[in-house]
Image: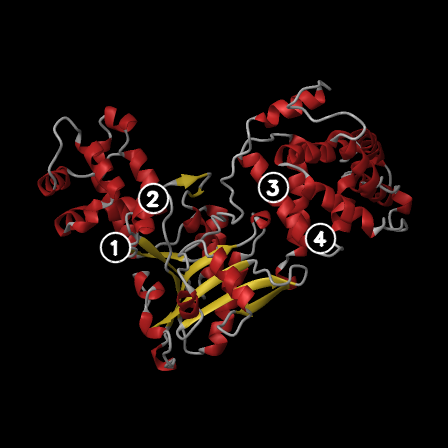
């Protein structure tokens, strides 16, 4: 369900920065002339960078005048935005590195104040607090004021969101590993977290009567189950369906995070019945048939808001909205994809584990025999490698015999992947981690729940329900966040026990 694993950001995070980036930067820093480096002449881009930064990044006011200094002209912020947007990708890296390194914290002043703070420890509390406040103020990067001023001009907040998306991409593509730029990213993330706090967000229900441009963006941003046409989006905002989005006054017309909900009699176990159900297009809702709300897709739309908590608050707000509309509704659950399961399983069946003889531990001897009987084994290929190739092709779903043979091992392997595989104590799977942090229970694995090519490629067609028992979510969330305890149903725990019994890992 979740694209916040995210958060597939939504501005093509797969773009690769050209290899000339580092060469350009090194050439610049060494002031060498080359066709690859930026010109250092008066009219060259680097000279212009210096001019823009000197003009737009104001000195940090003294501690005494911090609340009395007039803001710079709005034109400075606009000039900075226009200049940045005119730069090529490689130039943006150099520009932001210069901004973050040369216009950040005055480290000498910080060191001096830190020394004064140590000296003041034997003095009265008022003096200590004042020195601490001075030190705190000196730790403010100069560029923070520039970011704040940019946020106050038209489209300034959107510019900063996109700017952070660029910074995130610079790190993911290895275009930069500057510690100063990482600090800049942290400062910008902190500001965005303040500006996009839940109290400043507006919850909107999207219907067929919503503006056409907004509906089109909802369709374009859908990252879990792609929208095929206008009839498809009409169905997803029509009867027995709900679509909600968070918006912000500083970014009008832009959905920040979008949640799609199906209203059903029971907790759904198959996504095709939700996204391809034609009967609901012009149906009249019967409230007596609505007992459950299924969160089947949530997509963050802004790469620059990565790490800013929005999705969990959206789900909580939507639950309250639905309870108000349907007072008797008591079942709230996701129907979520399991991105990464197939990749993990391919690794478990891969050559390195196969050479150690450990891949055969994934299935019992009886299950290996059943698979051999259901397939025409290729001579000279080990059973784990044959299974790995079979899963990669997706052809096994066309055979009822293979499907029956693979269901028990794949279900328990998937249960272990969700429940037992960890990163720093948290669930390795990002969707699982998202819902568990919200206090949901890993409730039910569903076999052949997503027969689409994407579902088969990502998770062998398996999907999972994370159920929200409202009276337990707070306790579950605290247990997971503080103790890394995963709340799971008997079905999931039973599959995990089968894995532990059959697999010698």
The residue depicted at 37 percent of the width and 78 percent of the height is 282
Q: Point out the residue furthest to the left here.
A: 373
**Which disc number belongs to residue 156?**
4
Regarding mark 1 in the picture, which secondary structure is present there? Answer: loop
The first of marks 3 and 1 along the sequence is 3
443 on left or right of 410: right
> How is the model colour-coded?
secondary structure
Between disc 3 and disc 1, the foreground one is 3
Instruction: Please identify the quarter of the rendering in which residue 365 is found.
Output: top left
The residue depicted at 42 percent of the width and 54 percent of the height is 224
**Residue 385 at x, y percent in the picture:** 22, 32
Q: Is residue 4 above or below residue 140?
A: below
The first of marks 4 and 2 along the sequence is 4
Q: CA distance from mark 1 to mark 4?
A: 46 Å
397 on left or right of 74: left
Q: CA distance from mark 2 to mark 1?
A: 14 Å
Q: Nearer the viewer, residue 59 or 484?
A: 59
Regarding mark 2 in the picture, which secondary structure is present there? Answer: helix
486 on left or right of 301: left
**Which disc number belongs to residue 448?**
1
Q: CA distance from mark 3 to mark 1?
A: 38 Å
Q: Is residue 291 above or below residue 398?
A: below
The residue depicted at 76 percent of the width and 44 percent of the height is 80
The residue depicted at 32 percent of the width and 51 percent of the height is 455
> What crowding class fits label 3: few (fewer than 14 Cα within 10 Å), some (14-19), or many (20 or more)?
some
**Which disc number belongs to residue 341?**
2
**Which disc number belongs to residue 166?**
3
315 on left or right of 151: left
The first of marks 2 and 3 along the sequence is 3
Q: Nearer the viewer, residue 248 or 420?
A: 248
Q: Nearer the viewer, residue 92 or 188?
A: 92
**Residue 29 at x, y percent in the picture:** 71, 22
């Amino acid at each position: 369900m979740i694209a916040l694993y995210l958060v597939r950001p939504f501005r093509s995070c797969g773009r690769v920065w050209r290899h000339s980036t580092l060469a350009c930067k090194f050439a610049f820093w060494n002031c060498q002339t080359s066709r690859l480096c930026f010109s250092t002449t008066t009219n060259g881009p680097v000279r212009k960078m210096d001019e823009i930064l000197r003009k737009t990044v104001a000195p940090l006011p003294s501690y005494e005048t911090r609340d009395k200094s007039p803001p710079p002209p709005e034109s400075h912020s606009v000039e900075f935005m226009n200049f940045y947007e005119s730069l090529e990708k490689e130039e943006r890296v150099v520009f932001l590195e210069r901004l973050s390194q040369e216009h950040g914290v005055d480290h000498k002043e910080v060191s001096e104040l830190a020394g004064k703070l140590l000296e003041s420890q034997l003095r009265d509390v008022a003096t200590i607090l004042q020195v601490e406040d001075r030190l705190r103020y000196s730790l403010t990067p100069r560029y923070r004021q520039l970011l704040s001023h940019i946020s106050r001009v038209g489209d300034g907040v959107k510019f900063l969101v996109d700017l952070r998306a660029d910074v995130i991409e610079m790190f993911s593509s290895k275009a930069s590993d500057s510690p100063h730029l990482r600090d800049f990213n942290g400062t910008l993330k902190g500001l965005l977290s303040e500006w996009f706090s839940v109290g400043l967000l507006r919850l909107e229900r999207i219907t067929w009567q919503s503006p056409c441009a907004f509906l089109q963006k909802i369709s374009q941003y859908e990252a879990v189950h792609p929208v095929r046409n206008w009839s498809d989006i009409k169905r997803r905002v029509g009867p027995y369906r709900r679509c909600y989005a968070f918006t912000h006054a500083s970014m009008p017309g832009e959905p920040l995070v979008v949640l799609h909900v199906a209203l059903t009699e029971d907790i759904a176990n198959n996504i095709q019945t939700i996204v391809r159900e034609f009967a609901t297009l012009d149906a009249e809702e019967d409230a007596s048939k609505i007992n459950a709300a299924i969160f089947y897709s949530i997509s963050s739309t802004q790469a620059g808001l990565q790490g800013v908590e929005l999705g969990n608050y959206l789900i909580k707000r939507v639950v309250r909205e639905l309870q108000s509309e349907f007072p008797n509704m008591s079942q709230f659950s996701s129907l979520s994809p399991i991105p990464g399961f197939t990749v993990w399983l391919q690794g478990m069946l891969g050559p390195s584990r196969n050479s150690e003889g450990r891949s055969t531990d994934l299935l019992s001897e009886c299950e290996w025999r059943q698979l051999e009987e259901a397939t025409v084994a290729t001579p000279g290929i080990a059973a784990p490698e044959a299974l790995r190739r079979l899963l990669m092709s997706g052809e096994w779903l066309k055979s009822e015999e293979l499907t029956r043979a693979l269901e028990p091992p794949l279900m328990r392997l998937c249960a272990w992947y969700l429940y037992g595989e960890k990163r720093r104590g948290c669930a390795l799977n990002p969707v699982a981690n998202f819902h568990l942090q919200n206090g949901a229970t890993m409730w039910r694995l569903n076999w052949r729940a997503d027969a689409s090519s994407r579902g088969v490629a990502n998770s062998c067609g398996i999907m999972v329900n994370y159920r929200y028992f409202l009276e337990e979510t707070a306790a579950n969330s605290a247990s997971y966040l503080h103790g890394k305890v995963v709340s799971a149903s008997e079905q999931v725990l039973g599959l995990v026990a089968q894995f532990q019994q059959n697999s010698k890992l």
